[in-house]
Amino acid sequence: MEIIKYPDKNSWKEILQRPSFSLIELENTVGSILEDVKINGDSAIQKYALQFDKVKLNEFKVSDNEILNAENLLSSDLKNAINIAKQNIETFHISQKEEIKTIETTNGVVCWRKSIGIEKVGLYIPGGSAPLFSTVLMLGVPAKLAGCNEIILCTPSDASGKVNPAILYAAQLVGVTQVYKIGGVQAIAAMAFGTKSIPQVYKIFGPGNQYVTCAKQLISKEGIAIDMPAGPSEVAVIADESCIPSFVAADLLSQAEHGADSQVILVSNNLNVIENVNKELENQLKVLGRKTIAEAALKNSKAILVSTLEEGIQLLNEYAPEHLIIACKGENQLAENVINAGSVFLGNYSCESAGDYASGTNHTLPTNGYAKSYSGVSLDSFVKKITFQKLNKEGLKNIGKTIELMAQAEGLDAHKNAVTIRLK
Amino acid sequence: MEIIKYPDKNSWKEILQRPSFSLIELENTVGSILEDVKINGDSAIQKYALQFDKVKLNEFKVSDNEILNAENLLSSDLKNAINIAKQNIETFHISQKEEIKTIETTNGVVCWRKSIGIEKVGLYIPGGSAPLFSTVLMLGVPAKLAGCNEIILCTPSDASGKVNPAILYAAQLVGVTQVYKIGGVQAIAAMAFGTKSIPQVYKIFGPGNQYVTCAKQLISKEGIAIDMPAGPSEVAVIADESCIPSFVAADLLSQAEHGADSQVILVSNNLNVIENVNKELENQLKVLGRKTIAEAALKNSKAILVSTLEEGIQLLNEYAPEHLIIACKGENQLAENVINAGSVFLGNYSCESAGDYASGTNHTLPTNGYAKSYSGVSLDSFVKKITFQKLNKEGLKNIGKTIELMAQAEGLDAHKNAVTIRLK
């Protein structure tokens, strides 16, 4: 990794620039597929499945039999692991449930807020080299807890029409209601607009390649909600002399192996730490399965030497990393100053992969600096919070004058009149 | 209003179709203004202020003196009303603060979530016929409670360069940090990209005409968050024979006066109610200041006769109104079945204008059916919820095997290795 020493605060923005990420040139291609599925429904999906995934599909829905069989195809160890992860994710996300609090803001004026699950949600799970069944848990568990009625899942099949069994196992475990073996832009279109065989949903979640990301962005302009804007995955580690360089290197690599466009950042107040981590990176890279990908990602990556850890946290707040690992002494104190991050990992034993799989926190997080304004996926993402109010006559009397004066000053007579007529 | 009697469930979708609302044809015009401000900054803003608002601006920032003067220009009655409304909005929104709950999902694995205010937010308040100082309260109060550091407000001046004093009074009252007298697409661009005199923000809130709405949609593609997609305002009332038709008519008109594109829906299980409300509408329209606007809006509007109130609520869940008034006996029971709505008003004394101004709930709500997946503005809208986790060695031992198995099954060696190396 490139080492940058004591950068001036004015240069932070430039140093922290991410590899540029624009989807504008894809909009025409993606837009025409969306339009085609909107108009031609199932037959358009079949066409694109053949074209892109090289599979001839007569039926999109995964049958109950296929789902039952999936269970037999997995080792009991892996099923057990998935069950444990599901349990922890459930435990953490249940704690996000909001109780109804009834607030009497004025005598006779009672207001409250109630969370109600979004009726129909769609989860997209990419196929390809890594079958992300962990993402099925991360999206399906909160969807179920939120009380979403219809939870559909789209994921591409392989060329023989089969879906990865771990994805199917996780889907039935969390309570997905239907699984469809379709992928790519056509899957996003199907869930956004609905077709004869695939129901329309109100919100679409999940990762995908740049075509899928662009499709989600375009359908969000048509009123279908999406989880959040997406960009390449990233981690930042801040480490001092108390860190264990081999652990830090392992964490950086676990991010770097995601994709050649992933980015990792190391910040330290100690040049030795940076140099030792760099050495460890070289050692560990040699034996890595996804070595070529990780190597390419490290080329986008930087190690930054700062004067103090406090300055390091400031710099990282400017960067707003998706994942932030604090491998320093006094990590709790430093964490107090974190303002912009998706998820924060404290101390030497909180590796990012714990949160990616099994600690209980969600792994669908804001990338690309979006952590400055977006939260990761949580129970909140699957509900709408509806406000209610009930005024009795006394209550309206108490705030009626206020409403009348304000409505009048805004030039809205009828708003005023709705009060006046009741108090007459 | 057009009366539709006992429509078949299959026809609901068509009956409930909203007036079409598309911004695509504005994208080129709006996009070129955004681009101009992005490149040319303040001078582009001056140019558009002159062109659209007919005002020559040498300074955008509203001075402390102007803000002080504003206070003197308002009646003490109006100031008092604004203070009371602010107090109620504060009381309700404080109740939305989320305590930190620390959850030990497994022995030695501790996870929690912390809400942190978005550092920089921008509020847009339209000028024009109705000076929406109430919206300053609805956005500014939760922004301040959330702990946003920089809360900037843009609103157009009149041709003499003056900003409505009620807007300025409300802005200082809630703790807005800077007010800029600029409006339209150029204001959205300024907040999204920053200029020499106007700071960039991370999230933009507030209503506006279709150009402003289109601008917000476009900048959201560039990573600046927005409150929610917008459409024309709307109310639905469900009423039975216990309602007071003059109250219902007043509520329908208070929505209809917003704009010719507003929509109001009346649902009842009783034809007399519908006919009496229609008569009241005619009477009340005659004396209304914004009669022409309200009349036009009523042309988009419908009264629907249903067999039962339960069926009426089902139909309204399909419509997903921004505001829903339940003027029926057993209103609490009926409200239990509401799934899709922005804000719900129960009983004969809960008029929409109470929530618009002073009961304490927020009036920035999802329109256009977006209530199926979006919530209204709340304290949540001004924070990011960051997750944290801390595992000790024991904790990682407890879930290490789970992580290793899952990472391996997803083909992500380095994720697995981050655990293995720590447990060696």
Image (cartoon, coloured by chain):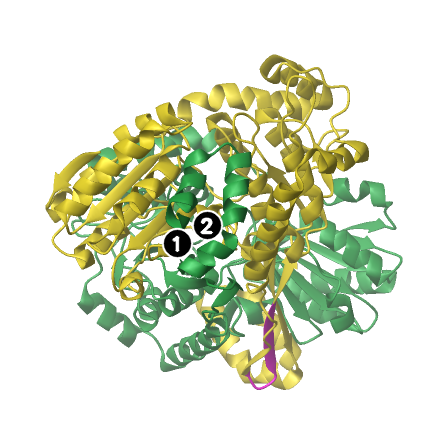
Chain colours: A yellow, B green
Q: Nearer the viewer, residue A206 or A400?
A: A206
Q: Kindly tell me whether residue B387 is visible in this rendering.
A: yes
In the picture provided, is A17 more to the left or to the right than A69? left
Instruction: Read off the chain for label 2.
Output: A
SS category of the residue bearing label 2: helix
Quarter in which the C terminus of chain A is drawn: bottom right
SS category of the residue bearing label 1: loop
Picture coordinates of residue B155 (x, y %)? 33, 55
Picture coordinates of residue A311 (x, y %)? 17, 55
Q: Which residues are magenta?
A: A106-113
Query: Which residue type does callout 1 highlight?
Result: Ser
Instruction: Read off the chain for label 1.
Output: A
A28 magenta-colored: no
Quarter occupied by residue B305: bottom right
- In this rendering, the answer to whether B103 lies above or below A49 is below
- Which residue is depicted at the point 33% across and 74% down? B74
Quarter occupied by residue B43: top left
- Which residue is depicted at the point 35% across and 69% down? B170
Q: Nearer the viewer, residue B81 or B379?
A: B379
Mark 2 and 1 residues: CB-CB less than 8 Å, in contact? yes
Quarter occupied by residue A195: top right
Residue tagged 1: A350
Residue tagged 2: A354
Picture coordinates of residue A187 (x, y %)? 62, 29
Q: Kindly tell me whether residue B214 is visible in this rendering.
A: no
In the picture provided, is A75 more to the left or to the right than A13? right
Magenta stretch secondary structure, dominant: strand
Query: Which residue type does callout 2 highlight?
Result: Ala
Count of marks overlaid on the render: 2
